[in-house]
Image (cartoon, rainbow, N blue to C red):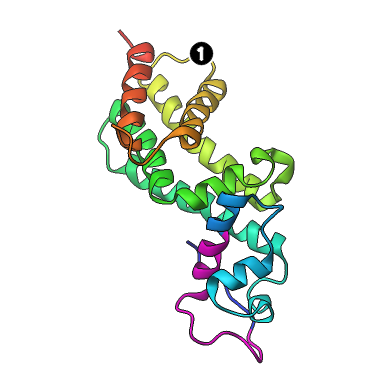
Amino acid sequence: MKKRESRVGPGRPPTIKDPVRTICDAAASLIAEKGYDTTSLQDVAKSVGVTKAGLYHYFPTKQALFETIVLDTLEDLYQTAATAIAAEPDHRSKLIGFMSAHAAYFSDHGDRFRASFFGRGGGEMANYTPEQLAARKAYTRLLEKLLEEGVRDKAFVVADIPTFARGILGMLNWMARWLRPDGPQSAPEIARSYASTILDGIAKD
């Protein structure tokens, strides 16, 4: 998560370790459970153990807090997937790595993921700021580039890469809605199974 500067002033909570992250995590948990509209800054302040006035030193509005959660989630997701791709030696394993990393992220950071993508209006593009849209586009582009390189090197056959990439992301994101932690397979295991099926369909003979 990118470190963000906070304002200094009287009443600022002095005892919170990594206050921005702590506040964002608490807010994400509440939004994931209750939704954006029914979560208040007072709810967040109570969860963190600070006054509402103290919370204002870090986030002046609920919208500002939510925007920080969404942007940080998108940036973290990008870094997680990019690192996974870079560690793999070939196109097939890179796609598996991307999909596994995506699934592992929402498995490990479920509240943040659900709050960011489902907490307000189901993730419609109209609810994103320009910064968030750029981060979302960069993440989609990361997958598209992976597919393009596979097609270029004749490892994959994909006719419409942007549509295909959106299909992969839709499949992964939908999993975050129904997956249960106590299920027979973990999120990365299911993602790898999805990836194997996809690769069977697009692998160059």
Which stretch is magenta?
Answer: 8-27
Which residue has dot 1 on it? 159
Where residue 69 appears, as percent x and y from the top left, is 57, 57
Residue 99, above or below 120: above
Judge by depth and name the residue closer to the eye, 40 or 18.
40
Q: How many marks?
A: 1
Q: Position of residue 155 (x, y in %)?
A: 33, 18
| Position of 28 relative to 144 (above/below) | below
Residue 93 figure quarter: top left
Q: Residue at x 52, y 23 (%)?
A: 167
Residue located 41% across and 40% down the image: 102
Task: Determine the image quadrant of residue 6.
Answer: bottom right
Amino acid type indicated by mark 1: Ala
| Residue 155 appears anywhere in the view | no
Q: Judge left or right: residue 205 versus residue 128.
A: left
Q: Does the magenta-highlighted stretch encompass residue 11?
A: yes
**Relative vertical location of residue 166 with respect to residue 69 in this rendering, above or below:** above
Q: Residue furthest left?
A: 89
